[in-house]
Amino acid sequence: MIEKRDIYIPCFQDMRMLHIYLPEDYEKETRHYPVLYMFDGHNLFFDSTATYGTCWGLKEYMDAHPQAIIVAPECNHEGNARLEEYSPYDFVWQEYDIKGRGKAYLDWMVQELKPLIDAKYPTLPDRENTAIGG
């Protein structure tokens, strides 16, 4: 199942949609799950929300292999904000000056998002069971 909820990202002073994949029986199970944190949550699960109309198909894959929870905030869709949020450094792309804010984003994921997810869902919170991908 995909749970969606708004979440505030203080370092960007912005609300985003958070997409969370949960195994269908997670509430009935007594087990805890590893967590994969990903980027661009809108592109992962449904074609209807994917930027270019085709998602990664992770819901179908995870439904067949329910071994983890996936947590994925949407990116900022305005101009070059996505590049700035994911880049750890400043750079010039085409004629645009991109101001890297990736460290602030990762700090938010580690210091605020991960503790929130670990408190709300049955996670395995240790480093061996926590990953990031994009």
Image: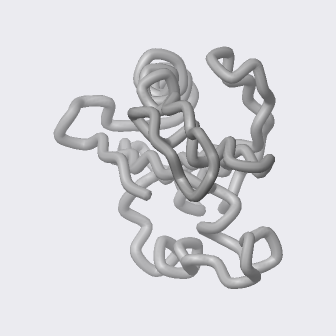
Q: Residue 60: x and y, percent?
A: 56, 80
- 75 displayed left or right of 109: right
Q: Residue 92: x and y, percent?
A: 50, 46
- 20 displayed left or right of 122: right
Q: Residue at x 59, y 39 (%)?
A: 97
| Quarter of the rendering occupied by the C terminus | bottom left
- Quadrant housing residue 76: top right
| Of residues 13 and 89, the one drawn nearer to the viewer in this rendering | 89
What is the residue that sits farthest to the front in this orientation?
Answer: 95
Q: How many marks?
A: 0
Q: Residue at x 68, y 23 (%)?
A: 12
Looking at the picture, does residue 102 appear above or below residue 46?
Answer: above
| Quarter of the rendering occupied by the N terminus | bottom right
Q: Residue at x 70, y 60 (%)?
A: 42
Q: Residue at x 25, y 43 (%)?
A: 129
Q: Residue 50: x and y, percent?
A: 73, 72
- 98 displayed left or right of 80: left
